[in-house]
Image (tube, grey):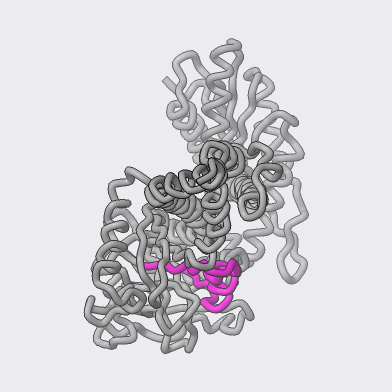
Amino acid sequence: MNLRPRFLLLTALFFLVVAAPSWLAVRAMADSIFAQWAMRYAEKQVLYDKSRTLLPILREVALARQLANSDVLRRWARAPDDTGSTQLAFAELESYRQNFQDKSYFVALLNNGKYFHNNASNEFAGKEFRYVLDAKAAKDAWFFDLIRQQRSLHINVNPDLNLGITKLWIDILIRDGDDILGMVGTGLDLTSFIKNVVEEHVPGVTSLFVDHAGAIQLHRDQKLIDFGSVSKSPAQQNTIHLLFERKQDQAAVLNAMHSLEARDKTVATVFVTLDGKRHLAGVTYLPEIDWYEITLLDLDVLLPFSEFTGLMAVYALTLISLLVLFNLVLRHYVVTPLEKLDQAMSLVESGQDSVPALDKLGTGEINHLMQRFVTMAHAVSQARRDLETKVQERTAALEKLTRIDPMTELLNRRGMLARLEAELQRSRREFGQLGILWLDVDRFKDVNDQFGHAAGDQAIKTIAQLISQTVRTYDAVSRWGGDEFLVLLPRVSQSTLDMLGERLRAEVEKCTAVTSESGEVIRLSVSVGGHLQQADDTIDTMLQRGDQALFAAKTQQRNHYQSSVGINT
């Protein structure tokens, strides 16, 4: 036999010896890369879905919490039959209704069981009271169950049989110290929320949300949603057993959920079987709303293993001609690009916006995969930047709401305390003196009683404007509460403080801008107390001494300015 056939025969025999284990080794390597890529893709998809879900909900939760903490609402909840408190409460609720995304709100009072509601079309203006909750009625069990559980925040999907609507409800308890006074909240349209957030337009990706028991809270198929979970026993709930036929898959997903409670990691992944097909389930915990998100990835759609078949065939043919060359080719066209891809994944995972240029690496399916990853990485980076921008904007807006009085657009008490603390520290560093003027509208209750709350609001706004126009540009003005104003004057002397205090009193006294509905001028006056910072002053002592000066001005028949000099010890 000639050398050439012998060489060919030897090569064939060598291939038979080497090909089988090599094939198994390469197949195992491809499986490992496939699994790692799928898990990282699942983690990124879950975190992306989490950000999309939380953004619209967290804003509504923040507004609902602020409404529940309103002093106006608390006073009304304690005395719901008081006409004045009721009017103020509905004005407060209306202002929040305009800010809620759904333009709707509900309030349920524990005192008398009354349920109030108004919607986006302002359909129930003037008739916000809808019905009385019945502790014995199944349709009202949600309210009494949440009160009994004392859960400050609860989010659930539930139909309101009395109002005939189904929404994603955000429920916040109204608390006053240890007392629970009722519940307030808003809703998001279920169909729109599912369409904009839950429905995923990427083929092979399904997202759903469950509670701690695995009850389905949101799913693009509304027939699977477990409405009103809070008032159901576990046996009555629609849980993930409706999705996973195999008990081991159900247990694996529940174990993944429980593993996240320790907060050791943000995303857990498990392989499951759904409708006879292999899926990767990514699970993350949303502590802000106490839900879990489950993202199911159909691996046959997202990463069909058939794309690797051509690679295996090339490997086998190349190994027949020259195994060493095949190893070099495999490393050049497969291993190196995948290593670069893994490095790029790590960069994206760490939050970096830039990734190596991968779209020139590899050929065929590998290059297509690189291009897809580069496109996905840019999309994830852009989405993260957009989300960060929106979060910053929302945070700034919420921060403004917490520091600005909405009626006068002056600083509120919280904003003024922060400014006062900063200026006090600054005055100590620069050895300057800080002064405060405390103004209180004289007989303001009489204005409200005689001319109505609209005239009272006009008086507050007018006085706020007069103060802002009278003081210096670098002074700070706040509405301290009700009919009280506090003016902060940095770098001021006793004579300047007294002059401004007397000037403010005089400007209010001669003001004729506030009129009744009949056109009658409403005469206003203020009592003013002034205090100049002493060496031992803290924020509390400055406020206390200013308040003492104001009290002294009040005792002198009002419409009077009084300095703290001579009345403090």
Q: Is residue 39 left or right of residue 180?
A: right
Horizontal and vertical percent position of residue 12: 47, 49
Residue stretch in magenta: 185-210
Determine which quarter of the picture holds residue 325.
top right
Nearest the eye: 275 or 254: 275
Q: Nearer the viewer, residue 476 or 518?
A: 476
Task: Decide whether residue 111 is among the magenta residues.
Answer: no
Q: Is residue 386 visible?
A: no
Q: Nearer the viewer, residue 216 or 538?
A: 216
Residue 353: which quarter of the image? Answer: top right
Q: Where residue 404 sits in the image (x, y, percent)?
A: 61, 46
Q: Is residue 69 above or below residue 168?
A: above
Tell which of 96 and 528 is nearer to you. 96
Residue ID at (28%, 60%): 179
Count how many numbered circles sit on residues in the image: 0
Q: Say which residue appears at 46% left-offset and 50% top-offset.
A: 30
The residue at 61%/46% (across/down) is 388
User: Is 185 placed left or right of 110 in the picture?
Assistant: right
